[in-house]
Amino acid sequence: MDYFIEGLALGFDAIAFGLVYHSYRFKKSAIKSIENVQFVEVDQKLVDHVASEPSKKLDYVVVRGKVIALSSPIRSINAWNTYGVVQKLTTREHLVTRHNFVGFWSERERTIQEVYNSIPFALRSGSVDIEVADALSAHCLDLETISDVYEPISISLWDYIWGFFTGIRPQGLQKTEEMVREGVLLTGIGELALSEDKATLRLQPSQDGLPFFLTSLPLNTLTKRLEGEKQTLKYLSIVFGIIGVGIMGMMAHRWYRNRLAKKLEEEEHLRLEKARKERRQRARSNNHEYSDNELCVVCRENPKEIILLPCGHVCICEDCSNDVTNLCPVCRAEILSRNPAYIS
């Protein structure tokens, strides 16, 4: 328990560092994979080219085309003339919370609902359609905001009083609708494979674990954005790393100080023990004749010098106290501690 607070802080810092560093490594590998990505010309020859590959796929390519729905498109719930293939509906609650009973109030928000709707779609380039598989698993899926509506909540007097005691006061609801609209240009980066009918192509997540992208950004702009995110994560990794090293340094310094203090305490204890034994030896060498009641019950040579606790018997000398460790020689009670006894 001596290092509980430091250990807790170090644990949280290690978790944060691990998450940030993992994201940094992912962004770094994503940038490297995009730099080495294979550009393909989308035309009728592309199907034959993929079919000629031994694995019937191209491992990591970039294609760009117009979004085309392969079934009835999704109609926007707020813009009736807008249709898309992927829809995200988010509801956030805006709150005002108090940090403690007499503290200050601050605004925050929490997501209370997040729903995705999607239909099969393809990227059309010229007369060739490339079906997109598992779009929601893309590491980067750019959605366009269709509507963002904030609806304030009217608070009654009772709600205001209840919020004062609970420390939570609702402010309103924010409803956001985002979509991948039909007809927009989308850049897809992933694995290009033949579909099950062997006649069309399908863009899907890479089986090698490379990142899958569906973005409206050009490739160079996407690279710049990832580079900026990578730099931010790099600096955060450095910060959390320095904090972790600092906490470990504080723990090591505290451990060294405690060990040094314990060592000095032990040395002082040994010095006092040595001085006390020397005084005992000088007291024994004065040729004083001891009666039987004054002699140690074990060796019967030295005087009684040690009191045993909790029984309280003064029955052994200091030399024999090193051998008598468990039970009192007189009453057989358990020995919990022992102290020098000075009999005048």
Image (cartoon, grey):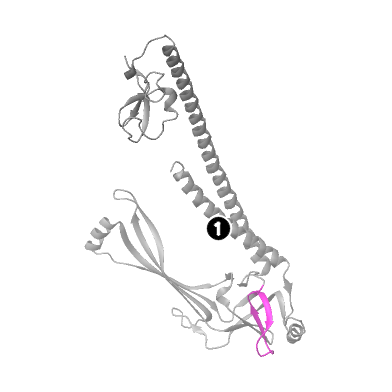
Q: Quadrant of the N terminus?
A: top left
**199 drawn magenta:** yes
- Furthest toward the left, the residue is 158
- Residue 342 appears in view: no
Residue 211 is left or right of residue 279, and the answer is right
Foreground of the two, 102 or 217: 102
Residue drawn at (59%, 69%) of the image: 140
Foreground of the two, 185 or 18: 18
Residue 143 is situated, as x and y percent measured from the top left of the image, at: 54, 72
Corner quadrant of residue 233? bottom right
Residue drawn at (47%, 27%) of the image: 265
Amino acid type at circle 1 is Leu
Which region of the structure is painted magenta? 188-207
Residue 161 is left or right of residue 86, and the answer is left
Corner quadrant of residue 184? bottom right
Q: Quadrant of the C terminus?
A: top left
- Placement of 56 over or under 294, stated as above or below: below
Residue 30 is situated, as x and y percent measured from the top left of the image, at: 65, 65
Residue drawn at (48%, 31%) of the image: 262
**47 drawn magenta:** no
Task: Give the structural element (helix, strand or loop) at label 1.
Answer: helix
- Residue 95 appears in view: yes
Residue 264 is situated, as x and y percent measured from the top left of the image, at: 50, 26
Residue 95 is situated, as x and y percent measured from the top left of the image, at: 36, 61
Residue drawn at (55%, 40%) of the image: 249
Q: Which residue is mark 1?
A: 19
- Placement of 248 over or under 199, stated as above or below: above
Are there few (<14), some (14-19), or many (20+) residues within 10 Å of tag 1? few
Corner quadrant of residue 209? bottom right
Residue 306 is left or right of residue 232, and the answer is left
